[in-house]
């Protein structure tokens, strides 16, 4: 359809509800497809404070987020924090704050861009990513291949205790401090959001929600709705209905965001798979599923074979019987051996493909490098160094460090190179900004030194 467009296409639906106990709805949300950003905010503090804080966060993003980039996103979060913090000086709004969880589409130059990083010019493919942004304990989930994964870390006292291994998830549910959040917009003069990139794949569904949803609705229920209802608005409405059915003790807000087109990433991946392993990724998954089934079958087969052998031994006084039994055993063993060999061969090929078909960007000593394979390797397949870059670890903006340390995966070498170029551009832009700032402040001494220039 529009798969060849090279652009990521998203479709969103949302629902919000006051719930069954609260007097007002202090959650706010925005779907801003024209800016490529989708936000949920859950306000807190006083009778009106929460409502005002979450609305201010949404308004600031709506008004001030103009250029889609990591920096612009970090900046607009900082601006929202400052505005809410300043407004909370008013007595009736004292102590107000809000969570914010958002997904933003960050497009790259549509026609590619030449970058000369000292290693020759390189033309880039168009490249788009989603950024997840989080402050507080609202959540972003990814629903992919039928499985639901929580993407965000809750910035809450209990979540930190669970992460440190000091209490269990079950203990957290009844913990007296379960409502205390450790990061929030508007309460302190500054805030550090979590921001990280994620590659969109067609068919992915993202779920952004306030705690009024996941405190009432289990992961299984959420998965079931996301599996059943293809329309994002219908899915959002159904999730809100289930939260009310579960108790509705808090305001509930849900955004369901679907990746309708991933700009050809899935096609590229399956084309690579068709070329290298002669099958689609689904066929690969079937191979693996078939592997476990077939192992079960062959175990049953071996047991039967043993039984046959035992019978054969017991019947060994009659040579003809022995012969027949033996022939039957051989035939079965042969069939099962062949089946098992075929299945294991297929599984090995699939694993071999899976272990080497992708690339990732990580650190090679103190430099950024591109590797082929999976971060940390896969079974017997170690990643191999594809290409070093001249980017030093201490030049890399802090935003990328976590991703690079874990290994940032890409479906093709071109994508990995594009990611490296992105980091490179970021470094250059930051350096230019720093330089222009320095030039401005040191302007007088520079103009006062023409003789030294003349001496050259
Ligand atoms: Mg809430």
Image: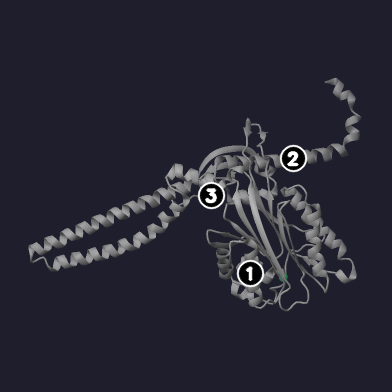
Residue at horizontal 63 percent and vertical 75 percent from the top: 173
**Residue 51 versus residue 366 in the image, above or below:** below
Judged from the image, the secondary structure of the residue bearing numbered disc 3 is loop
- Looking at the image, tell me whether mark 1 or mark 3 is earlier in sequence order: 1
| Percent of width and height locating residue 61 | 78, 56
Specify the quarter for ligand 1. bottom right
The CA span between labels 1 and 3 is 36 Å
Q: Nearer the viewer, residue 117 or 267?
A: 267
Residue found at the very far front of the displayed protein: 1
Q: In which quarter of the image is residue 180?
A: bottom right
Relative depth, front residue between 428 and 44: 44
Q: How far apart are marks 2 and 1 (CA)?
A: 43 Å
Quadrant (top left, top right, bottom left, bottom right) of the C terminus: top right
Where 150 falls versus 451 (above or below)?
below
Residue drawn at the location 70% of the way across and 46% of the way down:
397
In front of the other: 293 or 407: 293
Say whether marks 1 and 3 touch (CB < 8 Å). no
Determine whether label 2 and label 1 are within 8 Å by CB: no
Nearer to us of marks 1 and 3 is: 1
Mark 3–mark 2 CB contact (< 8 Å): no
**Disc assigned to residue 375:** 3
Mark 1 residue element: helix
Q: Indicate the colouring scheme.
A: one colour
Q: Residue at x 64, y 53 (%)?
A: 10
Structural crowding at the residue carrying mark 1, measured as other residues with C-alpha within 10 Å and reported as few (<14), some (14–19) or many (≥20): many
Question: Mark 2 against mark 1, which lies toward the viewer?
Answer: 1
- Residue placed under numbered mark 2 in the picture: 429
Quadrant hosting residue 277: top left
Disc 2 residue: CB within 8 Å of ligand 1: no
Badge 2 crowding class, 10 Å Cα cut-off, few under 14, some 14 to 19, many 20 or more, is: few
Pointer 1: what residue? Answer: 239
């Amino acid at each position: 359809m529009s798969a060849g467009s090279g652009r990521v296409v998203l479709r969103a639906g949302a629902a919000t509800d006051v719930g069954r106990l609260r007097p007002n709805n202090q959650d706010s949300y925005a779907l801003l497809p024209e800016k490529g950003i989708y936000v949920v905010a859950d306000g807190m503090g006083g009778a009106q404070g929460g409502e005002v804080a979450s609305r201010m966060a949404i308004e600031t993003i709506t008004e001030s987020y103009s250029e889609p980039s990591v920096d612009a996103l970090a900046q607009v979060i900082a601006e929202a924090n400052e505005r809410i913090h300043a407004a909370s000086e008013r007595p009736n709004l004292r102590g107000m704050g809000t969570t914010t969880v958002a997904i933003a589409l960050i497009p790259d130059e549509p026609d590619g861009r030449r970058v000369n990083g000292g290693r020759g010019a390189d033309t880039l493919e168009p490249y788009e990513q989603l950024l997840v942004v989080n402050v507080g304990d609202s959540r972003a989930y990814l629903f992919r291949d039928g499985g639901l994964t929580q993407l965000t870390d809750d910035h809450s006292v209990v979540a930190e205790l669970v992460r440190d291994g000091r209490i269990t998830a079950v203990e957290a549910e009844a913990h007296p401090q379960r409502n205390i959040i450790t990061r929030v917009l508007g309460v302190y003069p500054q805030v550090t959001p979590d921001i990280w990139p994620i590659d969109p794949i067609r068919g992915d569904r993202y779920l952004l929600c306030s705690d009024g949803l996941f405190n009432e609705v289990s992961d299984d229920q959420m998965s079931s709705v996301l599996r059943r209802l293809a329309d994002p608005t219908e899915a959002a409405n159904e999730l809100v209905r289930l939260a009310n059915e579960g108790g509705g003790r808090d305001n509930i807000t849900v955004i369901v965001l679907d990746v309708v087109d991933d700009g050809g990433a899935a096609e590229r991946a399956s084309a690579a798979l068709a070329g290298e392993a002669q099958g689609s990724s689904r066929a690969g998954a079937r191979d693996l599923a078939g592997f476990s089934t077939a192992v079960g079958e062959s175990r049953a087969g071996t047991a039967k074979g043993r039984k046959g052998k035992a019978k054969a031994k017991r019947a060994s006084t009659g040579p003809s019987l022995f012969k027949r039994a033996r022939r039957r055993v051989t035939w079965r063993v042969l069939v099962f051996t062949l089946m098992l060999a075929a299945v294991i061969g297929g599984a090995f090929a699939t694993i071999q493909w899976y272990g080497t078909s992708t690339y990732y960007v990580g650190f090679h000593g103190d430099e950024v490098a591109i590797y082929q394979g999976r971060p940390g390797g896969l079974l017997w397949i170690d990643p191999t160094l594809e290409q070093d870059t001249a980017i030093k670890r201490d030049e890399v903006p802090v935003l990328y460090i976590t991703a690079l340390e874990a290994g940032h995966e890409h479906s093709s070498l071109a994508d990995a190179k594009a990611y490296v170029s992105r980091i490179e551009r970021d470094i250059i832009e930051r350096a230019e900004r720093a330089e222009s700032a320095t030039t401005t402040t040191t302007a007088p001494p520079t103009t006062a030194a023409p003789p030294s220039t003349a001496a050259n």
